[in-house]
Amino acid sequence: MKTTLNELEINGVVYVPKGTEMRPAQSLDGMKYVIARTYSAGVFAGYLAHREGKEATLKNARRLWYWSGASSLSQLAMEGVKNPNDCKFPCEVSLVDLTEVIEVLDVTEEARICIANVPVWQQ
């Protein structure tokens, strides 16, 4: 009989098998892949090229205009979306300068791949 263990909890601490933990998204030339939320321009995902105070520059960025299958940006940053065909993520831009950045979330590799695979929304 073979038993598979996905996680084990000891004294309130959850342990998972090595290699199954969520890992950060692959970087690009040392830049982290992040989700940035601004005060009025919306939410973007891309590689953080520069950040100073409330200003940030993202490379290879997509605006996350509407998402489905993630209850929050936190879940989106960790897991991606469950309903990619229902999301509205326009095309990627090579560079975007953001002002009034109020939140920056590190993204896992799983979520980065998911965001990249959401079909381009256009009208």
Image (spheres, rainbow, N blue to C red):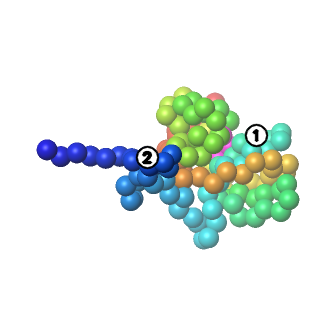
Q: Is residue 10 left or right of residue 28?
A: left
Cβ–Cβ under 8 Å for marks 1 and 2: no
- Bin the neighbour count of mark 2 within 10 Å (Cα to Cα): few under 14, some 14-19, many 20 and up: few
Of 71 and 101, which appears nearest the observer? 71
Q: CA distance from mark 1 to mark 2?
A: 38 Å
> x, y (%) of residue 38?
79, 44
Residue with the mark numbered 1: 42
Image quadrant occupied by the N terminus: top left
Q: Secondary structure at mark 2?
A: strand
Start and end of the magenta stretch? 60-64
Q: Report x, y in % for residue 81.
A: 53, 37
| Kind of residue indicated by mark 2 | Glu
Q: Please report the residue visible at 53 percent of the width from the left and 42 percent of the height from the top.
A: 80
In-image side of 30 versus 8 (left or right): right
Q: Nearer the viewer, mark 1 or mark 2?
A: 2
Residue 85, can we see it?
no
Residue type at mark 1: give it: Gly
Residue 61 part of the magenta segment: yes
Main SS of residues in magenta: strand
Quarter of the rendering occupied by the C terminus: top right
Q: Which residue is mark 2?
A: 9
Residue 7 appears at what percent x and percent y?
Answer: 39, 47
Which quadrant holds residue 73?
Answer: top right
78 with respect to 20 (left or right)? right
